[in-house]
Image: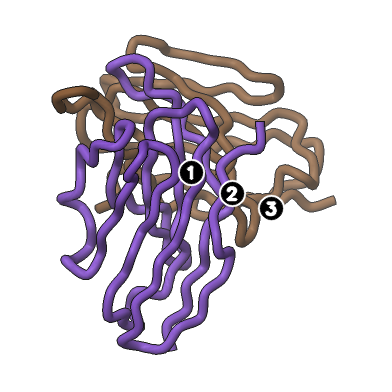
Amino acid sequence: DTGVSQDPRHKITKRGQNVTFRCDPISEHNRLYWYRQTLGQGPEFLTYFQNEAQLEKSRLLSDRFSAERPKGSFSTLEIQRTEQGDSAMYLCASSLGLREWADTQYFGPGTRLTVL
Amino acid sequence: SQQGEEDPQALSIQEGENATMNCSYKTSINNLQWYRQNSGRGLVHLILIRSNEREKHSGRLRVTLDTSKKSSSLLITASRAADTASYFCATDRTVEYSGGGADGLTFGKGTHLIIQP
């Protein structure tokens, strides 16, 4: 069990550029979640996949944010036309998702984004 | 938006003492979970308590849940320097989607715990 991995761990970009982050969940996990965490706050839920289906995306912060999980394994989170306010830690989590109720989510180390 | 509110925001105690953190939330929940986060790192899951449970233990951790008061507490006994971290409570609700009934977690702002050696 290698745990949830995220790549890159750090990303520095200039305002207006697009960035893409990758998350590899624990291999047998069906559910995958994206969160954003700013300094001094708890994580904020962004979106969620059950296998390849994106079941919740209304809480993505704006239409500049999008996520995919094309084959139900790894996922990508893209931010277009980045703004300084997008600077934050982006966390990915996964869970087994074998039953209809919520289960324990396991988090990756996060990708820290800095927008200059 | 944040649902949970941890109290206190910061707590400093001596090694060996017990640490108690509280969490209050606003809406009905399915489960409540506690996570630990060391500075600048990812979150580590500590314990999950379901809405029909009142108390749960795991090693030096004891969690209680009072759904009538919409509150939970996390007790760490015999604290160690390595327990220094931020602690978050997180709640979830069951949402009916076709194909799945889970939803993202809603976190509080956390309690920053410092254990003095």
Mark 3 or 2: the one toward you: 2
Rendered location of residue B112, percent (x, y): 57, 53
Name the kind of residue labelled 1 in the image.
Phe
Verify CB contact (< 8 Å) between mark 2 and mark 1. Answer: yes
Rendered location of residue A51, percent (x, y): 33, 32
Subunit bearing disc 1:
B
Location of residue A62 with respect to B44 vertically, above or below: below
Picture residue at 54% right of the left edge, 54% below the top: A6
In the image, the chain rendered in purple is A
- Give the residue number, with chain letter if any, for mark 1: B88
In the image, the chain rendered in brown is B
Is B110 in front, or is A116? A116
Is B62 in front, or is B17? B62
Picture residue at 36% right of the left edge, 39% below the top: A71
Quarter placement of the C terminus of chain A? bottom left
Name the kind of residue labelled 3 in the image.
Ile
Location of residue A22 with respect to B6 vertically, above or below: below
